[in-house]
Amino acid sequence: MKRDSRLSSVLHALLHMAEQDGPVTSETLALCLGTNPVVVRRTMGYLRQAGIVTSERGHAGGWRIHADLGSVTLRQLHEALGEPATFAIGNRNETPGCLVEQTVNAALEGTFAEAEALLLTRFSEITLADLASDFARRHAALRHSRNKS
Amino acid sequence: MKRDSRLSSVLHALLHMAEQDGPVTSETLALCLGTNPVVVRRTMGYLRQAGIVTSERGHAGGWRIHADLGSVTLRQLHEALGEPATFAIGNRNETPGCLVEQTVNAALEGTFAEAEALLLTRFSEITLADLASDFARRHAALRHSRNKS
DNA sequence: TTTTTCGTAACATCATTTGTTTCATGAAAA
DNA sequence: TTTTCATGAAACAAATGATGTTACGAAAAA
Ligand code: FES
Ligand code: FES
């Protein structure tokens, strides 16, 4: 199944932007993500609507983070992207008339709701600052191992 | 995103089969599910491979449950279907060379793994017998409300 | 005025699930 | 034995939805 990778994409883009002083262009991000500038604009547009980033046109334009890294959670990003469906598994008929299907749906939906709640809770506990520091840690570890060898 | 509804489908089919003495044909199940007999065979074939159902050809043929209702869990069914991908959200690049993507992937994967573990745990706690009794309960409630009105 | 860069719409591509057609095979009934 | 009913399996078609691409307009700076 083709999975929605927009959350992954915007995180990658935001980490790049966090390490940059000035704005970053869609072109640069697209190159980095291995995709098309239009796709970047389309996706980042959701974050702009949510007030998480700003964009400027013309010379020296591009994208900037418009929030404190510690205040942006994965959950906010997920919501900004329109809260896409979490699961790749679902009910055959969402509004069943018959009792058999209602029984099946109830069992599955309850379980999925529980798992989704956990997912969203975890998402709300992770900020961009966490990812940035995790990246710094990985970067330092890499340099360390390179120096040793 | 198009969600995999096979688990939902087989549950519906199995509940029907549980209320039936003899075997149930793919044709009957397909009519009930609103799909095609070939789709039913294809999907139920996974359960046959897992030993959960049997099939017979020819006159008076069809599908039978080959297990105790209380011993078949949703998790077993999920596994029989090949453990399809749980989430509709995923990483852009599953095997990233670069540290930024590794950082992003690690954060997302950890969270998804946790939610999936919860889902599978819940699945392993629900048996066909549970669903059958839930159905009976709903059925009784419906008859009761009908009698009152 | 030229260049850069985003904004947006429209269309193309790709991947995956689901549905359909078709024929072969086996088993029971006539 | 022949007919009928059912699954088994392969091959193909349709539908869906994410991602990629093209094209053009608008704004901002050089
Ligand atoms: S369709 Fe309602 S019982 Fe199967
Ligand atoms: S591609 Fe963006 S950092 Fe590796």
Image: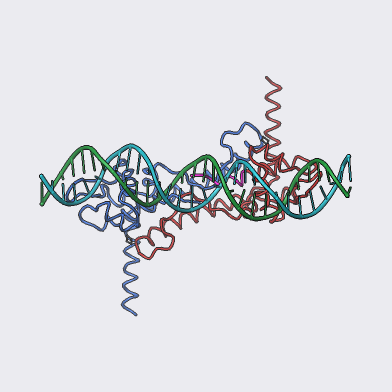
Chain colours: A blue, B red, C cyan, D green
Q: Is residue B142 left or right of residue A21?
A: right
Query: Where in the figure is residue B79, as x and y percent of width and height?
Result: 62, 55
Residue B10 in view in this figure = no
Give me the residue at 73% from left, 47% from top: B69
Front-most of residues D3 and B129: D3
Is residue A118 a member of the stretch shown in magenta? Answer: no
Query: Where in the figure is residue A10, as x and y percent of width and height?
Result: 35, 51
Q: Which stretch appears magenta?
A: B1-8
The C terminus of chain B: image quadrant: top right
- Vertical placement of residue A28 versus D3, above or below: below
Residue found at the very far top of the displayed protein: B149
Total tally of numbered discs in the picture: 0
**Quadrant of the image occupied by residue A103:** top right
Residue found at the very far bottom of the displayed protein: A149
Give me the residue at 64% from left, 37% from top: B34
Q: Is residue A4 left or right of residue D12?
A: left
Query: Where in the figure is residue B95, as x and y percent of width and height?
Result: 43, 63
Task: Name the chief secondary structure element in magenta.
Answer: loop
Residue B38 in view in this figure = yes
**Quadrant of the image occupied by residue C21:** top right
Q: Which quadrant does ligand 1 occupy?
A: top right
Q: Is residue D10 left or right of residue B102?
A: right
Query: Where in the figure is residue B1, as x and y percent of width and height?
Result: 48, 44
Is residue B7 a member of the stretch shown in magenta? Answer: yes
